Amino acid sequence: MNHLNIEQIQKILPHRHPFLLIDYVEDYEPGKYAVAYKCVTYREDFFKGHFPQEPVMPGVLTVEALAQTGAVAILAQEKNNGKTAYFAGIQNCKFKGKIIPGDKIRLETKIIKQKGPFGIGEAVASVDGKVVVSAELTFMIG
């Protein structure tokens, strides 16, 4: 297994706090897949307004965390060193559950197609083994 801590992730991804949404990578294979985790705490800035009476992680941020997980797989390839992965599309996105403070999100993105600078990742976020978000993410390397 290939592990990455936060410092190693920051050598691959251009994202930084407060927008770096993965805490560590459990395993990855460049160009193939990555499995990462986000440990959600009540101190996350977005909980101040989403929603004060019932804190829920915004779904769009979960999709972004999945995209960052896929970006680790893509940008870890030697040919993409120092580049950025941009969103090019989101298909078949489904939100199936809430993410709340105290949750540990498992983020898995498999690269299912890549042609030139474009590619597609199949992404799933789960909490305690239950799928909370799934989507097909299209990216472009720039």
Image: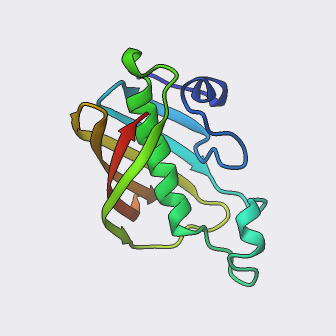
| Relative depth, front residue between 131 and 140 | 140
Write the residue at 66% across / 49% down.
19
Write the residue at 74% across / 76% down.
49
Residue 142 location, quadrant: top left
Q: Where, quadrant-wise, is the N terminus in this rendering?
A: top left
User: Vertically, is 24 above or below 39?
Assistant: above
Side of 17 where 78 appears, left or right:
left
| Relative depth, front residue between 17 and 129 | 17
Q: Position of residue 20 (x, y in %)?
A: 63, 44
User: Vertically, is 117 above or below 93?
Assistant: above
Write the residue at 76% across / 80% down.
52
User: Vertically, is 30 above or below 84?
Assistant: above
User: Vertically, is 71 above or below 31?
Assistant: below
- Residue 80 in sight in this render: yes
Write the residue at 62% across / 68% down.
100
Q: Of all residues shown, which one is farthest toward the top?
A: 78
- Residue 128 in sight in this render: no
Residue 141 location, quadrant: top left
- Tally of numbered discs: 0
Residue 53 location, quadrant: bottom right
